[in-house]
Image: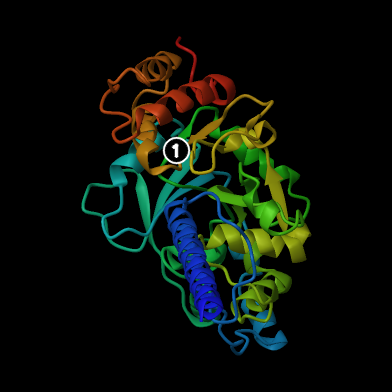
Amino acid sequence: VAVRLRLLRGIASTFFSLLILLQVATAKEKLHKGAVARQSPRGATPVRRSPSSRMPAASPLCFTNVTARASVQQFQSPTKSLDDNFIHVCFYDTRKHPDVPAMLRAAALFNTSSVKLCALLSHPPREETAGLRIVPLRVTGAADCLYAGLSRLSHGPGPQYLMKPLLGWVMPPEVQRVILLDTDTVVLRPISELWDEFGRFDGAMIGVVAEQSNLYQEKSDWRLIGKNGGVQLLDLQAMRTSEEYAHALDHFASGNAGEYIGFLGDQTLYTVMEGVYPHLFYRIGCEWNRQLSMHFGFRNASVHTCSSPCSILHANYGPLKCVAQLMQSSPTCTTWQRFQDKLGSGAVYQGCPGHLPQSMQNLLKKVIRRFFADCCIANS
C-alpha cells in the first residue's frame, strides 16, 4: 500500500508539474502575441507565408492576355503620354478626416512654381485645400478587381494602403509620374533632386527606400529586403502601359503567389513582388526616407546608418508623430537641437514628445545624435 501511495503521489506530482509548465508556456505565447500586436508599426513587419487558416483560396484572375492588352492600349495614345514638365507631388490619406493641415505644412517646404500638388483622399476634406488638387481614391473595372483581390489578402489597416500600387489607374492620365508622400514626412532637401531619381529607373516602375529594420530579411531567410512605403516614386505611365505589371499584380491579387499580405499593405506587397519581379523596382537612397520608428530598436547600426545627408525625415512612430508637425513648421537645426535638449529632462518641447517614457526619450536622444543629427536645415 505504501509503495502504491508513493507511486500515486509521484504520478500526481508529475501531472501538476506538466500542467504548470503548460500554463507557463501558454502565458509566454500570449505575451509574445501581445508584444507582436503592440509592435505593429507602419514601417516594419515580418514577411511570411500566412497559415492556411488565414490564406484564402485563389480567386479568378482579373486580366486575360486580351483584357490586359486592351487596358494598356487605352493609355498609349500620344495625347495621353505627353510630359507636362511639372514635378507632381501627392499626399496620401485614407482617414475619414484627412490631415490637410499636415499636407499644407509639409508642402510649404518645397512648393515652387515647378511643383503641382495633390491629395489622394478616400473622404472629402473639411478644411480649405488651397493649392491641393483633390483626387478621390477610386478605381473601376479590372483595377477594382485587383484592389478587391489584394484587400482580401490583407487585414486591419492593410487594405487602405493597397491603392498605392494602383495609382496608375487612379491618377488623371496626363500625370505621368508622381512623388508619393505620407503626411508624417519632412522634406529637407530640394524635391527636384528626388524627382531626378526617375532618370535612373532603367525600366523600373516603383522606387522605394529600404525598410530600416531587418525584420523582413530575417523572416524570409534573407531572401527579401523590406520596403517602406512612406516615400514612393511611381512611374504611372509605365505602370499603365505595362502588361507585365498588370499580370504581376494579378498574380498576387488572385492568391496564386501564395503570399498573405497582412496589415501593412503596399510595403509587404512590394517586398514580396520584388522577390519575383526585381526589375520593376528601383531602390532609392536611404537619405530620402530616414525612419524614426522605435518599434524594433536601433541596435543594428548597419540599417540605420546612412552616409548621404538626410533629405526626408519620416516620423513613422506613434509617439513621435508630433516631430513631423514640429519640423514641418520649423525645420531648422535650432528647432531640432532644442527638441533633443528636452529629451529625458522630464519636459517637452512645444508639446513633443507627448507620451514617450523617459527611458525611451534617453534612447531617442542618443539615436538622434548618432543617426539623425543632420535631419534639419542649417540656419541661414
Residue 7 placement: quadrant: bottom right
| Rendered view: 79 above or below 208 | below
- Name the residue located 57 percent from the left edge and 57 percent from the top edge: 267
Element class at badge 1: loop
Judged left or right of residue 181, residue 304 is right
Name the one closer to the observer, 251 or 168: 251
Q: Quadrant of the C terminus?
A: top left
Residue 135 placement: quadrant: bottom left
In the image as oriented, which residue stretches furthest toward the left? 126
> Can residue 179 be seen from the camera position used here?
no
Q: Residues within 10 Å of mark 1 (few under 14, many from 20)?
A: many
Per the image, the residue denoted by label 1 is 315
Name the one closer to the observer, 115 or 270: 270
Residue type pointed to by label 1: Ala
Name the one closer to the observer, 197 or 6: 6
- Name the residue located 78 percent from the left edge and 58 percent from the top edge: 279
- Name the residue located 54 percent from the left edge and 80 percent from the top edge: 4
Name the one closer to the observer, 357 or 213: 357
| Rendered view: 114 above or below 279 | above
- Name the residue located 35 percent from the left edge and 63 percent from the top edge: 122
Q: Where is residue 32 in the image (x, y as percent from the top left)?
A: 49, 57
Q: Position of residue 249 (x, y in %)?
A: 64, 72
> Can residue 190 be seen from the camera position used here?
yes
Rendered image coloring scheme: rainbow
In the image as oriented, which residue stretches furthest toward the front? 1
In the image as oriented, which residue stretches furthest toward the bottom? 60
Q: Position of residue 332 (x, y in %)?
A: 42, 18
Q: Where is residue 210 in the image (x, y as percent from the top left)?
A: 65, 45
